[in-house]
């Protein structure tokens, strides 16, 4: 299985201004010089983390998802990040996984941030989303999900002759405030170590509409918890190639999963 090249977009966001954010992000993505296969945007990249769902939401065939489809096809990349989606009478903080051919998958944030009243506005998801790219399995999560390790716990097929971890890369897109950045950085490393996988966390920077500052601290972490990339306070697009052989060597050398608890958490 081959390597995977990923670009992280750490940026400030225009509060509640979808047109400005999509224009800014399109310029940034078109400006990526390196060859890349997957571009990761922050949580609610078109609006910032916002409770004004009635005013800012769109359907799945709305402008933002169409923008993702068009840009993905133009740049021949997979494009992902979360947006505010309305479906029937429910609002979702939904991560869209857009392929260059126009096909897409999605993940609805499982853990709503009650401290900010997210659960009073948005409906929680009830299923994981694991994408497949070039033989890589990629588990996609959103922000507050990071605090709940059971949700991202590796699963194994109990009937397989040689149990294989369910996924290889864990992605978190976020609007995570600076005041809790220690938790962000600590938990990202913990998720990598406990699941023996790569972890990518993409966070925004700058103040939101409530004056809350975000320091970014976007990170790439290897399966041993080693930090391969970290950036705070500045806008940056960073492209990295993840080594599949490194992942497999660690899993073969340190077969910690063989001592896992026998029960499954549903």
Image: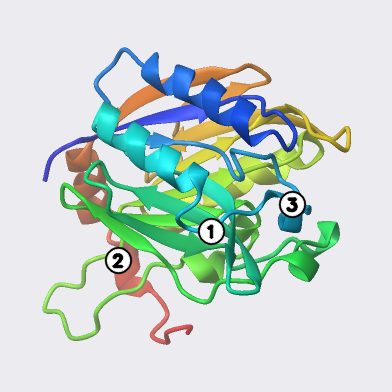
State the residue in front, 255 or 111. Answer: 111
The mark found on residue 55 in the picture is 3
> Vertically, is 97 above or below 126?
above
Q: Which label's residue is closer to the chain start, 2 or 3?
A: 3
Taking the spot 57% from the left edge, 22% from the top edge, the residue there is 231
Question: Percent from the top left, x then y, of residue 46?
Answer: 60, 38
Q: Which label's residue is closer to the chain start, 1 or 2?
A: 1
Q: Residues within 10 Å of mark 2 (few under 14, many from 20)?
A: some
Question: Percent from the top left, x then y, of residue 136?
Answer: 23, 51
Seen from this angle, which residue lies furthest right?
A: 211
Marks 1 and 2 close (CB-CB < 8 Å)? no
Is 16 placed left or right of 9 in the picture?
right
Please tell me in which quadrant of the rendered image residue 13 appears: top right
State the residue in front, 153 or 218. Answer: 218
Measured Cα–Cα span from mark 2 to mark 3:
38 Å
Mark 1 secondary-structure assignment: loop
Question: Percent from the top left, x then y, of residue 172?
Answer: 52, 48
- Residue located beneath label 2 in the image: 166
Question: Percent from the top left, x then y, of residue 122?
Answer: 69, 66
- Residue located beneath label 1 in the image: 59
Tell me the mark number nearer the camera, choosing from 2 and 3. Answer: 3
Q: Is residue 96 visible?
A: yes
Tell me the mark number nearer the camera, choosing from 1 and 2. Answer: 1
> Vertically, is 223 above or below 262?
above
């Amino acid at each position: 299985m081959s390597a995977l090249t990923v670009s992280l977009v750490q940026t400030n966001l225009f509060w509640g201004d979808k047109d400005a954010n999509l224009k800014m992000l399109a310029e940034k993505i078109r400006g990526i010089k390196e060859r890349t296969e997957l571009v990761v945007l922050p949580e609610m990249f078109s609006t910032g983390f916002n409770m004004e769902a009635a005013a800012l939401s769109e359907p799945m065939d709305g402008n933002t998802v169409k923008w993702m489809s068009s840009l993905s096809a133009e740049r021949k990349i997979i494009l992902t990040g979360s947006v505010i989606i309305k479906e029937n009478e429910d609002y979702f903080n939904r991560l869209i996984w857009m392929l260059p051919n126009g096909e897409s998958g999605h993940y609805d944030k499982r853990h709503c941030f009650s401290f900010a009243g997210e659960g009073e506005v948005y409906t929680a998801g009830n299923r994981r989303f694991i994408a497949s790219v070039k033989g890589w399995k990629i588990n996609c999560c959103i922000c507050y999900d990071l605090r709940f390790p059971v949700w991202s716990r590796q699963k194994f097929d109990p009937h397989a002759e040689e149990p294989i971890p369910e996924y290889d890369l864990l992605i978190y897109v976020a609007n995570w405030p600076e005041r809790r950045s220690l938790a962000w950085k600590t938990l990202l490393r913990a998720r990598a170590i406990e699941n023996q996988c790569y972890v990518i966390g993409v966070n925004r920077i700058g103040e939101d509409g409530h004056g809350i500052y975000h320091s970014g601290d976007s990170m790439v972490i290897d399966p041993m918890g080693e930090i391969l990339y970290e950036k705070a306070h500045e806008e940056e697009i960073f492209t990295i190639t993840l080594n599949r052989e490194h992942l497999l060597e660690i899993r073969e050398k340190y077969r910690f999963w063989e001592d896992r608890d026998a029960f499954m958490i549903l």
